[in-house]
Amino acid sequence: MAKERRKLPRLRQFYRCLCAQYPTPLPTVLRLRARPGEPKDFGGCDRVASGRKIAIYVNPRFAASSCHDTLIHEYAHALVWPHARVDGYRPDHSPEWGIRYAEIIEHWTTGDLEKKSWEY
Ligand SMILES: [Zn+2]
């Protein structure tokens, strides 16, 4: 496979890579649109499907590099989302989130994750 060149296919490709490289406790779904009710935000994540999945929103109105950063940020939230708590959890920027976020960023900045993502 080759690296996707257009923004939305490239975000989907990178998301598939993240799913394979960093399994989340709950299944996720990528939604390349604004988070409902938040048209000016970069993105967000919410539990959907009666709590069975985490929707990761990336608002495509922003530049590709911003969308990419947002995807990593929101994906890190999905990585630390508590398995047992269906309701009442609000994603935050806890130390646990920061560790997972930094892990992906480090993997990205070494170039490994970029090249690996072309395979997805
Ligand atoms: Zn956040």
Image (tube, grey):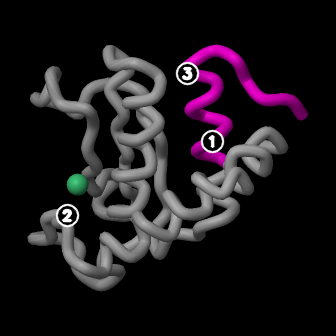
User: Is residue 15 found left or right of 56 in the rendered image?
Assistant: right
State if disc 3 and disc 1 touch (CB < 8 Å).
Answer: no
Ligand 1 within 8 Å of disc 2? The answer is: yes
Query: Taking 64 as reference, is 29 above or below it?
Result: below
Q: Residue at x 43, y 72 (%)?
A: 100
Magenta region, mostly helix, strand or loop?
A: helix
Q: Earlier in the sequence, mark 3 or mark 2?
A: 3
Per the image, label 3 sits on a secondary structure element best described as helix
Along the line of sight, which residue is nearer the eye, 72 or 9?
72
Q: CA distance from mark 3 to mark 2?
A: 25 Å
Along the line of sight, which residue is nearer the eye, 81 or 41?
41
* Image quadrant in which the C terminus is located: top right
User: Is residue 118 found left or right of 67 in the rendered image?
Assistant: right
Residue 14 magenta-highlighted: yes
| Residue position marked by numbered label 3 in the rendering | 8
State if disc 2 and disc 3 touch (CB < 8 Å).
Answer: no
| Residue position marked by numbered label 1 in the rendering | 14
| Residue position marked by numbered label 2 in the rendering | 91
Image x and y of residue 101, in percent: 40, 64
Inspect the image, locate mark 1, and give the three-letter code of the amino acid beneath it: Phe
User: Is residue 88 found left or right of 10 in the rendered image?
Assistant: left
Q: Quadrant of ligand 1?
A: bottom left
Q: CA distance from mark 1 to mark 3?
A: 10 Å
Q: Residue at x 48, y 46 (%)?
A: 29
Inspect the image, locate mark 2, and give the three-letter code of the amino acid beneath it: Pro
Image x and y of residue 27, in percent: 50, 62
User: Is residue 84 found left or right of 26 in the rendered image?
Assistant: left
Q: Which residues fall within the magenta stretch?
A: 1-16
Q: Residue at x 45, y 28 (%)?
A: 65
Query: Taking 21 as reference, is 115 above or below it?
Result: above
